[in-house]
Structures are given as C-alpha cells and as structure tokens.
C-alpha cells in the first residue's frame, strides 16, 4: 500500500509540473521536511526505481497516427471502387453482416478492409504513404535508444502493422519483443490482455514501466496489476 501511494504521489508530482504555484508550494514543503528528516521528492525518486523492462504503446506513442486520418478519404474511395458499394452501404454491411463495432463514432479502417477481403490493398496504401513522410515520433525514438534495459512494445495493433513501420524506419533492432493484438484475444482495455502479456513475455509488473498515450488503457488498467505507468508527454520530461 505504501509503495502504491508513493507511486501515485510521483505521478501526481509530474502531472503538476506545469502548475508553478503548486510546485512552488510543494517544493517549499519538502525543503522544510529536510530540516527534520532525510527526504526525497517523489519525482526525483522515479529515476532511482528498479525498472528492468520498459514497454511502449505504439499508435499515438511511437507512431504518428495522423497518417490514418490523412489517408481515410483515399482509402474509403478505393474500398468503394473495389466493392461497388457506397460508403454508407459499406458501413451498414460492416456492422450488420461483419459485426464490426464503431469506436468514437467511426469504424476502424483496417478492420473494414479486412472484413471485405482487401487487407493487402490497405497495407499497400499505408506503406506508400510511410515512404513519403516521417510518421514516427523521433523525440520518443531518441529517448528509447538511450534505455539500456529490456524494451518492448505492447499494442492493440496487428503485428503486421508494427512490423511494417519497423521495416520502413529501420527500428527492428530497437526492441526486444513486440506484443500485439495477434497475441491476445483481448485489448488493452481488459486486464486479461495484460495478464497475457505478463505470461508470454515473463513480465514482473512492479519492475516494469509502461509508457503510452491513453490514460485508461495505458495507465489506469495496467496499474491495477502493479505496472508502473506514465503517459508519453511526462515520460519525455524525465531525465
């Protein structure tokens, strides 16, 4: 319980760094405590924690997902041409016949192409666009390169997607393992996904830091199993 409260304090400290008034008052508090005891601020202690494995989310953390919104109109036009259906008809068929579900009011483009047997066409379009422009977060990659401990990826994406990015941006040797939607029938929104990850990659949660961009999937849920979790923008602030 004390360790959990300590980590919560540490995360709170990082998230508060943009609020100068909070941090000033808080730092004064710690300075006073130094007069009566040996004390260390939680955010200073993060770098001294025993972390043996760093695991990163992919979409939105390492990969710039703007590629998907950019290609969406072109992809849907291609799917419409290949199927002879309008976008409305494609959506109706995907939901009623293929049982696809919307997330935030939209169907996943990759799932659409897979349902209609057009997955190779989808990946061809993605690959062509990846060669034209950097859709990789270089500041994140540079920070990952400095980590000497075991490193991995855990994402909902298909392995084919991640391996495509690894190939184009020459990142194949950067990670020790890649755990994807192909390795679990669950998504990161379920604790069962994280248990599958722990078993397959021999992960000890208390010695693992997970870095992502989604508070619920990448922090709230895995932290219930003991993972140390931090959002990507705060991770980039750590020394």
Image: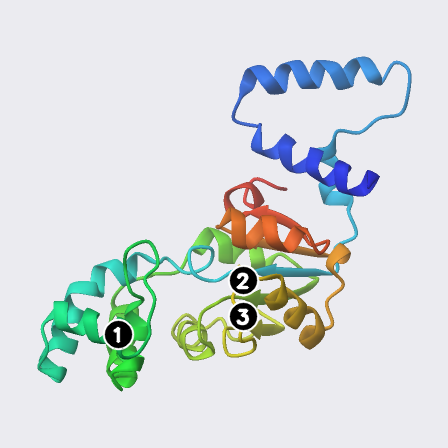
x%, y% of residue 70?
Answer: 22, 59
**Residue at mark 2 to residue at mark 1: CA–CA distance:** 25 Å
Q: Residue at x 40, y 75 (%)?
A: 161
Up/down of 118 relative to 66, above or below: below
Q: Secondary structure at mark 1?
A: helix
* Quadrant in the picture for residue 153: bottom right
Mark earlier in primary sequence (3, 1): 1
Up/down of 123 relative to 48, above or below: below
Relative side of 38 to 197, left or right: right
**Residue at mark 3 to residue at mark 2: CA–CA distance:** 7 Å
Mark 1 Cα shell of 10 Å, populated few (<14), some (14-19), many (≥20): few
Mark 3 Cα shell of 10 Å, populated few (<14), some (14-19), many (≥20): some
State the residue position of label 1: 96
Q: Residue at x 44, y 75 (%)?
A: 158
Total marks drawn?
A: 3
Q: Seen from this angle, which residue lies furthest front?
A: 96
Q: Secondary structure at mark 2?
A: loop
- Tag on residue 234? none
State the residue position of label 3: 186
Q: Residue at x 63, y 49 (%)?
A: 229
Q: Residue at x 40, y 77 (%)?
A: 164
State the residue position of label 2: 188
Q: Mark 3 or mark 1: which is in front? A: 1
Mark earlier in primary sequence (2, 1): 1
Relative side of 215 to 14, left or right: left
- Which quadrant is the N terminus positioned in? top right
């Amino acid at each position: 319980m004390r360790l959990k409260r300590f980590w919560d304090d540490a995360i709170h400290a990082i998230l508060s760094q943009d609020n100068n008034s909070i941090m000033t008052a808080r730092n004064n508090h710690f300075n006073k405590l130094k007069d009566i005891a040996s004390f260390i601020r939680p955010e200073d202690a993060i770098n001294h924690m025993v972390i043996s494995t760093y695991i990163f989310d992919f979409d939105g953390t390492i990969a710039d997902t703007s590629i998907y919104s950019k290609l969406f109109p072109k992809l849907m036009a291609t799917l419409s041409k290949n199927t002879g259906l309008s976008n409305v008809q494609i959506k109706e068929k995907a939901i009623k016949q293929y049982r696809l579900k919307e997330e935030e009011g939209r169907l996943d483009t990759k799932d659409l192409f897979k349902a209609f047997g057009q997955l190779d066409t989808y990946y061809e379009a993605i690959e062509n666009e990846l060669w034209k422009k950097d859709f990789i977060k270089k500041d994140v990659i540079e920070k990952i390169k400095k980590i000497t401990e075991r490193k991995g990826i855990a994402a909902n994406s298909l392995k084919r997607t991640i391996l495509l990015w690894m190939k184009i941006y020459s990142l194949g040797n950067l990670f020790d393992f890649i755990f994807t939607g192909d390795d679990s029938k669950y998504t990161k929104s379920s604790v069962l996904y994280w248990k599958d990850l722990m078993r397959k990659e021999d992960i000890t949660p208390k010695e693992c830091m997970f870095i992502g961009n989604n508070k619920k999937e990448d922090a709230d849920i895995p932290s219930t199993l003991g993972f140390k979790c931090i959002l990507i923008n705060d991770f980039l602030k750590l020394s």
